[in-house]
Image (spheres, rainbow, N blue to C red):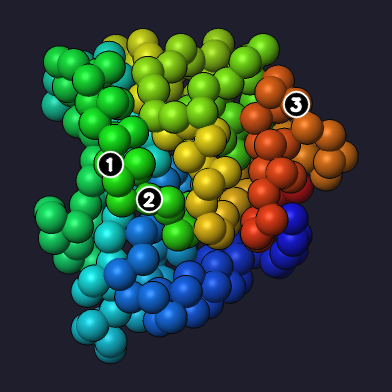
Amino acid sequence: MKFHYYPDFETMSRQGFELVKDEIEAKPDLLFCVASGGSPSGLYAEMVKHRKSNPDFCSSLRVVKLDEWGGLEPGSTFTSEHDVQTKFVQPLEIASERYTTIDPFTKDPIGDCSRMKEFLEMSGPVDICILGIGVNSHIALNEPCATLTPSFHVCDLAESTLNNGMIKSLKQPPTFGMTMGVGEILSSRKILLFISGSGKKEAFDQLLKAEVSTQFPASLLWLHPNVDVLIDQRMV
């Protein structure tokens, strides 16, 4: 695991973009796992900016979504889908046949997770997996637990996740999650973990200990040979 410290969010995002750009230029049709949230949003903005002067950039990129909230009220814009559509999929003009996702309002979450699992078995592994870290150390929606599921699955949400300020403000908060499993994440050829935003210092300090435990899901990344951790040092 390689740790990179940057003075601010903008510098962190630009350096993350350089890592991603090199990989895409070497393999234009690589499989990219897109994560929602604020931490990787600067990376996506840099990718969109680069494409304006390089129209072929990401024209062959294949994309799969990392996770999704379930149980939100119909039409909610709190979904991961809304976030990645507005920040990544639409501005980069990722065609629907190159984007594999899960519907936040699906009537069959177990079936949709099985479909995502089958896609990764057939089309994976992921070449670049983008991750953030939760205040309780979750990666994707793999929450601290005695055991973790290796493949895409419906998951329970931890109280510490549901008590997040943004989620608590929702009229109808999520009641479950749908997420890529830790086995699929660890099968990725390259992982970029972005750490920024308030409340992450405790999780980051724990990550630095290099002690692996399912009660601290981000620590499993120590088992992967190619992880870059990009840190906005103002936040830690």
Find numbered disc 3 in the image and state the secondary structure of the residue it sits on: loop
Closer to us: mark 1 or mark 3?
A: 1
Label 1, on which residue?
A: 119
Label 3, on which residue?
A: 213
The residue positioned 71% from the left and 44% from the top of the image is: 223
Query: What kind of residue is marked 2?
Result: Gly
Q: Give me the C-alpha separation between circle 1 and circle 3.
A: 28 Å
Circle 2 Cα neighbour tier, 10 Å, few/some/many (<14 / 14–19 / ≥20): some
| Residue 194 at x, y percent in the picture | 59, 53
Quadrant assignment, res 66: top left
Task: Decide if residue 176 is in sight here.
Answer: yes
| Residue 43 at x, y percent in the picture | 46, 64
Query: What kind of residue is marked 3?
Result: Ser
State the quadrant of the N terminus.
Answer: bottom right
Tag 3 or tag 2, which sits nearer the N-term? 2
Label 2, on which residue?
A: 124
Tag 1 or tag 2, which sits nearer the N-term? 1
Closer to us: mark 2 or mark 3?
A: 2
Circle 1 Cα neighbour tier, 10 Å, few/some/many (<14 / 14–19 / ≥20): some
| Residue 6 at x, y percent in the picture | 70, 66
Asked if the residue at tag 1 contacts the one at tag 2, i.e. Cβ–Cβ closer than 8 Å, the answer is yes
The residue positioned 28% from the left and 41% from the top of the image is: 119
Position of 170 relative to 82 (above/below): above
Position of 227 relative to 131 (above/below): below
